[in-house]
Image: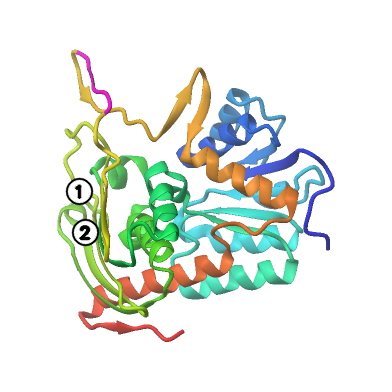
Amino acid sequence: MPQTVSREVLNVGVVGVGIQGEGHVKCYQAAPRARVAAVCDANADRAQQVAAKCAVGAVCSSYEELFAREDVDAVSIALPDHLHRDAAEKAFRAGKHVLLEKPMATTVADAEAIVSAQKAAGRKLMVNWSNRWMLAFSQTKEALDAGTLGDPLYCYARLNNTLYVPTKMLSWSANTRLPHWLICHRFDIARWYFASEAKRVTAVRRYGVLREMGIDTPDFYQATIEFQNGCVGNFESCWILPETLPWIVDSKFQLICTRGYVNVDPLLPVHVRATDGKYEQPGYLAGDVMGEPTGFVRLAIEHFVDCVLEDGEPLIAGEDGLAITKTLCAVVEAAETGEAVELDW
């Protein structure tokens, strides 16, 4: 089958139109080289609402129905973390290109099955670790490639959520783990910078707050990951911060190199907002400007569109997703067993 699509505009279907999926719809509709042909969601009312809001012409009752449409060339899959495999395999069997929301999967077997299906179909696969398109992370990679910072040695990465996320935003938080939900973003950046695979993983986790609330998932993870080239990363994530904080996401990334240092703090406020009910820091990384989405998620989605239309290789392809999944699963295993996990590539 040909890799490219023989038209100037890519027709896309979006599977799952929750918070992230609706964002995909908006970004595609704003992109000059894409349009959304159809959406679907297990919540039919939600799918209808998003379709009406974003001027999408068709709503499908299932992703199988969406994949069968001839006017859909590529699909975004924005389902809960643990439900990616079936949808991705069926999309590839239907001959579609796939943009798969992070994480690729929550098990190595599922990730391997997705890559196998992609290779059999000869279609594009991009895993949407969109943080690579954040300006600070992208500029740091350019500085590393230019040799300005010397060689990378060590990173400290923190990515946390408030309790809002596992208790109110996600109905399925017990079906994932923080390495797949949050650590994955910063591990992807570290792997990109270090240009090496993980070699040895040690990790700890603790249950408490969420389990007492009836949600059977750990409150936090801390992992130390040693890479094959000698680089080391320290990664930590929790999602039990108080909802009274003026933001949902707490982030910090520090990189130490042989001739330089980088400190990426996306939460440094460029503006704050206070009303009689709330004090908040709205952020500046992404959002709508004059009614049109802007920021790193849109840039990542447009990269996928360009790769399909121009037969390019996505920046984060299936093999990358598989390698990242193997390491994240090693973090979960190390935390469960209390033993170091050695990765064999």
Q: Mark 2 points at which residue?
A: 220
Q: Nearer the viewer, residue 111 or 263?
A: 263
Question: Residue at the spot x=67%, y=51% of the render?
Answer: 307
Are there few (<14), some (14-19), or many (20+) residues within 10 Å of tag 2?
many
Task: Give the residue type at disc 1.
Answer: Ile
Question: Residue at the spot x=38%, y=61% of the render?
Answer: 180
Q: Which of 322 and 134 is in front in this view?
A: 134
Name the secondary structure under disc 1. Answer: loop
Q: Residue 147: x and y, percent?
A: 39, 61
Residue 220 appears anywhere in the view: yes
Q: Which of 282 and 155 is in front in this view?
A: 155
Q: Which comes before the other along the chain, label 2 or label 1?
A: 2
Above-or-below relation of 192 to 71 = below
Name the secondary structure under disc 2. Answer: strand
Is label 2 in contact with label 1 (beta carbons under 8 Å)? yes
Q: Which of 329 and 309 is in front in this view?
A: 309
206 sits to left or right of 318: left
Q: Main secondary structure of the magenta part?
A: loop
Question: Residue at the spot x=17%, y=33% of the render?
Answer: 244
Question: Residue at the spot x=25%, y=82% of the render?
Answer: 340
201 sits to left or right of 83: left
Q: Residue 183: x and y, percent?
A: 33, 59
Q: Mark 1 points at which residue?
A: 240
Residue 271 forms part of the magenta stretch: yes
Q: Residue furthest top?
A: 276
Q: Residue 23: x and y, percent?
A: 51, 36
Range of the magenta residues?
270-275
